[in-house]
Image (spheres, rainbow, N blue to C red):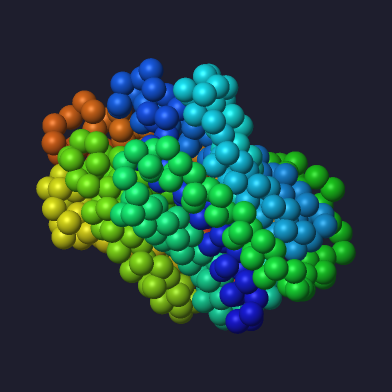
Amino acid sequence: MPRLAAASLAGTAIEFYDFFVYGTAAALILGPLFFPTFSPVAGTLAAFATFGVGFVARPLGSVLFGHIGDRRGRRPVLVASLLLTGASTVAVGCVPTYSAIGVAAPLLLLVLRFLQGLGLGGEWGGAVLLTVEHAPAGRRGLWSSFPQVGPALGFLLANGVVLGLSATLSEAQFAAWGWRVPFWAAGVLAVVGLWLRSSLAESPRFLEIDDHARVPLAEVLRDHWRLLLLTGGALAIGYAIFYAVTTWSLAYGTEQLGVSRSVMLTCIMAAVVVKGALTPLAAVLGDHYGRRPLCLAGCAAAALWMFPMVVLLATGDPLPMFLGFLGAMLAFITMFAVIAAYLPELYAPRVRCTGAAVGYNLGGVIGGALTPIVATALAEQGGRVPWGVAAYLTAIALLSLGCFALLPETRPVPAAAGAEAATG
């Protein structure tokens, strides 16, 4: 289990690095390079729109790779998704800007961002299921939390590279070529990830299935449609929080508040460090007290914290901003530390890869794709304190709270029985 968990963690970290480095670039530099005819705010909105395309592609990727995972095994998904995401990310770093090829530049960004999202849509389901289905029933939460640490590591790696480049390069150098370096680095990371995953064994739970679903998506939509909608709605606030903190606030702080790029990145990264470190602890609590209570507590905390968070952000001071981000990340991880165990336990093994992955990535469309765009537009209409952003995030938290309230508990019911109880 430690070797498997480490390989899953490293793989998700690498793939989420690919995904997050685009979000950071969208917040800081892609607008003027690829949408120079727009105003600064409109350029940021356009860059965030290309960012959102990745979230739209993620459910499609979960359908594609979920089909492979339910029909052919979890392990092939890990290799194929990593290759696709890594190649797409490297290609983003090679796209000429608008000044060189005109409108073809943002169109190429859209296509590559779509391919990034397609690959990442398969990554989470494959990595989590391989870990969950190897883990003993009483420790599923703990072991499945390691792939959930991967996004935090990927984010820190992506932003650490950007922070290092920002500190060593001039603004002109960063705009000319420095922003491309993090994308090129994805190629090296992809090779490392493929090496780590080359020796992983197939999930024993998958090998036990005698009757594989012929068309897993059709079965999920026919028999589990209500569960699919509830899980998508329930996870929306987690995505909304994460991308409000890591993407929208980065653009808002640098463009509207005049805070330096380095200070914003440091505040955000410090909060993400704490979030990543506490993930296994929250997962252990989920093994002991149940998945659903922690998810409900996280949603409630998010609903109560969004207004204080934007007030602290609006100060523009490092310590208050860090505390605002930290409170949001603690609410986030209270939910998402146990999601890797919770979602697979809700779905029957024969359609688990498709159902869990589609539900997870559907939440990304609702909460992740729209949040930077909506928040940027709302902040533009308000004063120094973006009250509209806080209201928007609070509304999503209440939606997710209602969805979690309608989902069943799964611990300590075994995964197969839990799926039957949840969907019957």
Image height check: is 279 above or below 61?
below
Q: Position of residue 219 (x, y in %)?
A: 75, 46
Q: Position of residue 124 (x, y in %)?
A: 60, 57
Tell me which corner region of the image, top left, top right, bottom left or bottom right, holds residue 221: top right
Please indicate, yes or no, whether residue 335 appears anywhere in the rendered image: no
Q: Which sits in the foreground, 331 or 290?
A: 331
Please indicate, yes or no, whether residue 279 appears anywhere in the rendered image: yes
Q: Position of residue 321 (x, y in %)?
A: 19, 54
Q: Which sits in the foreground, 391 or 108?
A: 108
Q: Quadrant of the C terminus?
A: bottom right
Residue displayed at 68% across by 75% down:
134
How many badges with numbers are in the image?
0
Tell me which corner region of the image, top left, top right, bottom left or bottom right, holds residue 350: bottom right
Tell whether 26 sits left or right of 388. right
Q: Which sits in the foreground, 124 or 166?
A: 166
Tell whether 414 sits left or right of 398. right
Image height check: is 181 above or below 422?
above
Residue displayed at 42% across by 30% down:
33
Q: Which sits in the foreground, 417 or 327?
A: 327
Residue displayed at 73% across by 53% down:
80
Tell me which corner region of the image, top left, top right, bottom left or bottom right, holds residue 28: top left
Q: Position of residue 406 (x, y in %)?
A: 47, 52
Tell whether 398 sits left or right of 420. left
Residue ranking furthest to the right: 210
Q: Quadrant of the N terminus?
A: bottom right
Residue displayed at 69% across by 63% down:
194
Image height check: is 356 above or below 210?
above
Image height check: is 348 above or below 217?
below
